[in-house]
Image (cartoon, rainbow, N blue to C red):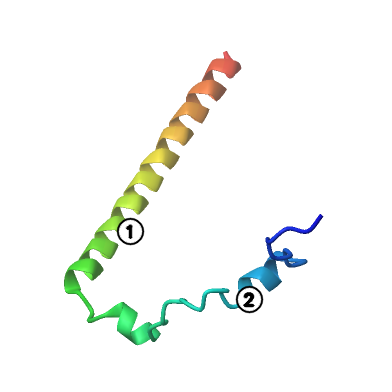
Amino acid sequence: MKTDEPKLPESLTRFLAAPPADGAAPASRPAEARLGPIDRRSAHQALESALLRGFVSVTSGLVWLLVLGLVLRHLAR
């Protein structure tokens, strides 16, 4: 029994590397065009995000140390 479906490629890599059958692939733009102009607000937001993540990490570490100290004090008694 024959079907109208095309044979599947042997690997996913070959499938992804193969051009689309209908030929309607979107034209890729150069990387510079995708980036656009540098936005100062995004740089500020990135710095703010990094500082906030650092603050959360330090606070979390201090809480863990406090809990560990309380557990060790409880076990020592």
Sequence-wise, the earlier of marks 2 and 1 is 2
User: Split into 4 quadrants, where in the image is the C terminus?
Assistant: top right
| The quadrant where residue 37 appears | bottom left
Does 35 appear above or below 73? below
Residue 16 picture location, percent across and down? 62, 70
User: How many C-alpha atoms fall within 10 Å of the one at disc 1: few (<14), some, or many (≥20)?
Assistant: few
User: Hey, what amino acid is under mark 1?
Assistant: Ala
Identify the residue at the far front of this view.
1
Q: Quadrant of the N terminus?
A: bottom right
Query: Quarter-wise, where is residue 48 in the image?
Result: bottom left
Q: Which residue is the site of mark 1? A: 50
> On the picture, is 4 further left or further right than 37?
right
Q: Which residue is mark 2?
A: 17
Q: Residue at x 54, y 16 (%)?
A: 74
Going by the numbered disc 2, the residue's amino acid type is: Ala
Nearest the viewer among 60 and 31 is 31
Instruction: Find the residue positioned furthest to the left.
Output: 41
The residue sitting at the top extreme is 77
Q: Which of the two discs, 2 and 1, sits closer to the camera? A: 2
Q: Which mark is residue 4?
A: none
Query: Disc 2 and disc 1: Cα gap in Å?
Result: 37 Å
Q: Is residue 50 left or right of residue 42?
A: right
Vertical order, 51 against 75 (above or below) = below
Residue 62 place in picture, x, y as percent: 41, 38
Is 46 situated above or below 21?
above
Residue at horizontal 56%, vertical 74%?
20
Please determine whether, in this image, residue 44 is positioned above or below residue 3. Answer: below
